[in-house]
């Protein structure tokens, strides 16, 4: 059981059982007494109010109104929230934008330094623009749920990404590319990539991508993407 899963199990046990002991928790989650004591300290740092009785056999009690006050979100989870805000902002439909920005700023501030660094690198790959009114949206589908985590690995480690792609005619091909940017043209989302097989940039509609998989052994260099004049980096929307 990893640390996060163990912390969740401890909180569930405390909520379910009321008063319990360190030894009982250790037996329940399969960890040592020392590990449980360290976990209790970490949970208190996250904002959980856990009362304890002194002594080796003393009990632990979670305050019934206790909640977590620090963010435990992964980079992809925060990025997904930012994507939602970016899409609404690009579409010109973002009510309560001040509150959204304030809330996201608090989440970013709570991230560990290494996660915040990755998030900012991820955001630098995001661009927005306006979709042509002539674009056909009749075949727009859902995006593969594994896409964002695959993007995180490929973009941050700068490694190739392979996937199956279904074109406008329904023909499916296997592609392997260098992911360079993400482009939002509401309501469509695109992966902008350098295609070594075709020696040029290609735009792949994300709802037509399936089975994405990073290729760990193949690195690539960052390239300048020649966007149209009406496309801008996401960060410029915040100015």
Image (tube, rainbow, N blue to C red):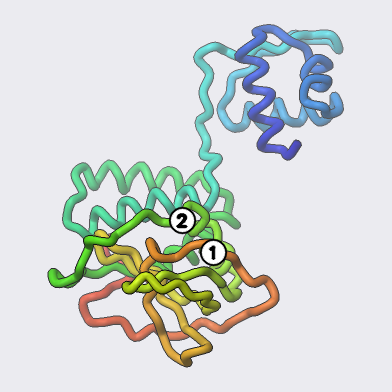
Disc 2 is placed on an element classified as loop
Question: Which of 180 and 114 lies nearest the eye of the viewer?
Answer: 180
Frontmost residue, 175 versus 45 = 175
- Quadrant of res 188: bottom left
- Name the quarter where the C terminus is drawn: bottom left
Query: Neighbour class for label 2 at 10 Å: few (<14), some, many (≥20)?
Result: some
Whether residues under marks 1 and 2 lie with C-beta atoms below 8 angstroms apart, the answer is yes
Residue 144 numbered tag: 2
Q: Where 123 falls versus 57 (above or below)?
A: below
Residue 157's x, y, as percent? 61, 70
Q: Is residue 235 visible?
A: no
The image quadrant where one finds the N terminus is top right
Quadrant of residue 234 within the rendered picture:
bottom left
Which residue carries the number 1 mark? 212
Name the quadrant containing residue 102. Answer: top left
Residue ID at (44%, 54%): 79
Q: In this picture, is 93 found above or below 53?
A: below
- Position in image of residue 100 (x %, y %): 30, 44
């Amino acid at each position: 059981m990893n640390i996060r899963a163990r912390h969740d199990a401890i909180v569930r046990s405390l909520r379910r059982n009321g008063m319990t002991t360190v030894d009982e928790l250790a037996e329940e989650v399969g960890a040592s007494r020392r590990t449980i004591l360290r976990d209790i300290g970490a949970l208190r740092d996250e904002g959980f109010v856990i009362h304890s009785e002194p002594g080796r056999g003393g009990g632990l009690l979670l305050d019934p109104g206790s909640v977590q006050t620090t963010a435990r979100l992964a980079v992809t989870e925060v990025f997904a929230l930012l994507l939602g805000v970016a899409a609404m902002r690009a579409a010109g439909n973002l009510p309560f934008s001040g509150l959204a920005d304030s809330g996201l700023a608090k989440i970013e501030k709570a991230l560990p330094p290494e996660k915040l660094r990755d998030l900012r690198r991820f955001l630098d790959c995001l661009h927005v623009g306006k979709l042509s009114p002539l674009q056909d949206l009749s075949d727009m589908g859902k995006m593969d749920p594994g896409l964002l985590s695959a993007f995180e690995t490929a973009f941050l480690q700068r490694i190739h990404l392979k996937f199956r792609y279904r074109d406008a005619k329904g023909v499916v091909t296997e592609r392997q590319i260098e992911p360079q940017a993400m482009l939002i043209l509401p309501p469509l989302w695109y992966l902008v990539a350098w295609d070594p097989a075709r020696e040029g940039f290609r735009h792949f509609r994300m709802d037509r991508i399936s089975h994405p998989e990073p290729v760990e052994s193949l690195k690539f260099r960052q390239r300048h993407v020649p966007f149209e004049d009406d496309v801008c980096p996401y960060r410029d929307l915040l100015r």
